[in-house]
């Protein structure tokens, strides 16, 4: 019996769709899903929270909206929840207190993946909120993994790229900016770079660079699919 998946999305909408489709693809590739009945039941609550890309506009309102979403997904029968956003997962422990069903964390899932791959030094492309709220720091530190963060100028470039993606105005210049930051992180000793924003996999991928890119959305989606199919 497949578990019902709850997705808190809308941060941004295309990133939510990407997470959903990656779960579907995992079922097709790994579980041989072919007919509609082969896929898990999935509920998506796409919520219009205050901005979390450039900064966290209102943490209290954001938390309240997320709590409402988690309870809603629990009440419609979801067995567990994933959140289609890296930035707001600094609130994960607070959200988990509000519901009885598990909420899978993207940082925990990613850190375990990196440890399994023996990666010790990792760069990160993420929003300012993800960086300042240290969404990944503790999980990586516990696995003995060093995090290489963007410098101030690189973070400003990242923010501009993410905002363009949210507005549907991404250009080749945006991809070039991401590649420039990735190269910089490689020079600083990164063995690989985390794509730790759900809006970035649509802009840059492995064919654009020779350094290993790790799509956190893909790792998260894979874990959600496996969890939904577990007994």
Image (cartoon, grey):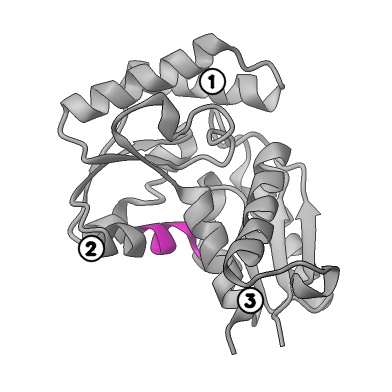
In the image, residue 9 above or below residue 154: below
Could you say where residue 110 lies in the image, as x and y percent from the top left?
39, 57
Label 3: few (<14), some or many (≥20) within 10 Å?
many
Q: Nearer the viewer, residue 86 or 25?
A: 25
Could you say where residue 26 lies in the image, as x and y percent from the top left?
60, 62
Q: CA distance from mark 2 to mark 3?
A: 25 Å
Asked if the stretch drawn in magenta spans residue 213, the answer is no
> Of label 1 and label 3, which has the lower sequence position?
1
Q: Quadrant of the N terminus?
A: bottom right
Q: CA distance from mark 1 to mark 3?
A: 33 Å
> Of label 1 and label 2, which has the lower sequence position?
2
Which circle, 2 or 3, is nearer the viewer?
3
Q: Residue at x 71, y 69 (%)?
A: 33
Q: What's drawn in magenta, residue-wise?
A: 105-110
Secondary element at image label 2: loop
Secondary element at image label 3: helix
């Amino acid at each position: 019996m497949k578990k019902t998946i709850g997705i808190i999305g809308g941060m941004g909408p295309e990133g939510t769709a990407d997470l959903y489709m990656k779960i579907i693809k995992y079922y097709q590739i790994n579980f041989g899903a072919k007919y509609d009945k082969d896929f898990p039941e999935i509920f998506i609550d796409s919520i219009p929270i205050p901005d979390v890309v450039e900064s966290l506009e209102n943490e209290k309102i954001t938390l309240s909206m997320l709590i409402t979403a988690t309870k809603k997904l629990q009440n419609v029968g979801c067995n567990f929840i994933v959140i289609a956003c890296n930035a707001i997962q600094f609130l994960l422990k607070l959200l988990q207190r509000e519901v009885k069903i598990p909420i899978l964390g993207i940082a925990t899932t990613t850190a375990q993946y990196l440890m399994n791959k023996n990666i010790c030094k990792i760069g990160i492309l993420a929003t300012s909120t993800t960086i300042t709220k240290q969404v990944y720091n503790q999980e990586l530190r516990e696995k003995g993994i060093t995090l290489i963060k963007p410098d101030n100028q690189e973070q400003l470039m990242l923010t501009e790229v993410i905002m363009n993606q949210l507005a549907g105005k991404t250009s080749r210049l945006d991809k070039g900016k991401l590649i420039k930051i990735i190269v910089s992180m490689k020079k600083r000793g990164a063995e690989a770079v985390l794509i730790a924003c759900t809006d970035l996999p649509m802009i840059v991928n492995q064919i654009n660079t020779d350094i290993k890119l790790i799509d956190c959305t893909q790792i998260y989606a894979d874990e959600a699919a496996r969890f939904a199919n577990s007994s």
